[in-house]
Amino acid sequence: MLERSRELLYALVAVVFISIVYLVMVALERDLPPARELYGHAMGIFGFLLMLMTETLYTARKNLKSARLGKMNSWLEFHIFTGIVGPYLVLLHSAWSFNGLAGLVMLLTGVIVFSGFIGRYIYSAIPRTAEGIELSLDELELRIADVENRIHLVGDLASADANLRALDKQRTRLRRQANGIVNARRLLALWHLVHVPIGLTLFALAVVHIVSAIYYASLLH
Ligand code: HEM
Ligand code: HEM
């Protein structure tokens, strides 16, 4: 279970580390670091770059389809890591003030992270290989047949209770996946229709915020 959620664990460690540094800064300055000053700016820029990587890298890997570029699973884990840490840095950058367009960009950022967690849940209902490639229903049926064969083989041996129970559990899980595969795929496609446009709107508005922030807040002061 922990192995399957390790990107969440790494993200949590990064969030705790960033929070400690942030609290030290607040204690030293006796105030929240403002968005337009050195620390606030740095958090905004670094967070935005992580978000930009979240938006582009996984999709690029998906389209390139070359195994030499690493497992799809690892890219999705990285997507989730940067998709949590980037928005968290940007949240600290806002100095907890959410006015105007920047406030709307922050809200959309919160929505896309929340939506990401829902997508991750649906995604995990679709059976895949260790590399993260989707299994077809036929491949799934083959796996079920293989487990059933092993159940027969193990069943012939005495004192094989634990093995039988493990195989039986595996068979139940595979059957559940085979029954739900069509709906899960449909649901994930539907979820993409929401998640992807939110990302695009978010980045379009973020660019407006950044350009106007640099223009008004930095250059004119
Ligand atoms: C998706 C990324 C970003 C989000 C969601 C975001 C969000 C915000 C928010 C909520 C505020 C506070 C607005 C207020 O209530 O006054 C703010 C302020 C600011 N942001 Fe960002 N920001 C992002 C990226 C950036 C980047 C990359 C830069 C710099 C290049 C930047 C520069 C600024 C500046 C200078 C201010 C201060 C504006 C002022 O005090 O009038 N932001 N941002
Ligand atoms: C800044 C935040 C985020 C942005 C901009 C973002 C953007 C995107 C985009 C553009 C896609 C479509 C990829 C494609 O199919 O080509 C995607 C897919 C996905 N995202 Fe995110 N995401 C963010 C955060 C998250 C988070 C926090 C999670 C999980 C907790 C997450 C989980 C997923 C999942 C499971 C998929 C579907 C993968 C697939 O169908 O192959 N995302 N995201």
Image: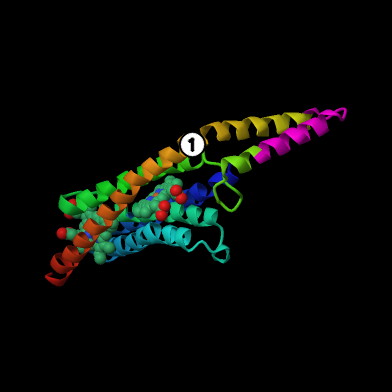
Residue with the most extreme right position: 158
Residue at (48, 56) in percent of width and height = 78
Nearer-the-camera pick, 156 or 163: 156
The quadrant holding residue 21 is bottom left
Colouring method of the image: rainbow
Q: Quadrant of the C terminus?
A: bottom left
52 is higher (above) or lower (below) than 1: below
Q: Residue at x 42, y 58 (%)?
A: 59
Q: In screen coordinates, is 118 left or right of 162?
A: left
Report the amino acid beneath label 1: Val
Kindly tell me whether residue 33 is visible in this rendering: no
Residue 61 vertical position relative to residue 183 in the rendered view, above or below: below
Residue 68 position (above or below residue 167): below
At horizontal 11% and vertical 70% (from top left) the residue drawn is 220
Measured from the top left, where is residue 161 in percent x and y?
Answer: 79, 27
Magenta region includes residue 158: yes
Q: What is the magenta range?
A: 142-161
The answer to whether mark 1 is within 8 Å of ligand 2 is no
Residue 145 in the image: x percent, y percent?
Answer: 70, 36
Percent position of residue 103, x then y: 20, 50
**Dot 1 corresponds to which residue?**
182
Q: Is residue 215 magenta?
A: no
Q: Residues within 10 Å of mark 1 (few under 14, many from 20)?
A: few
As rendered, which of 171 and 202 lies closer to the eye?
Answer: 171
Q: Quadrant of the N terminus?
A: top right
Query: Which secondary structure, mark 1?
Result: helix
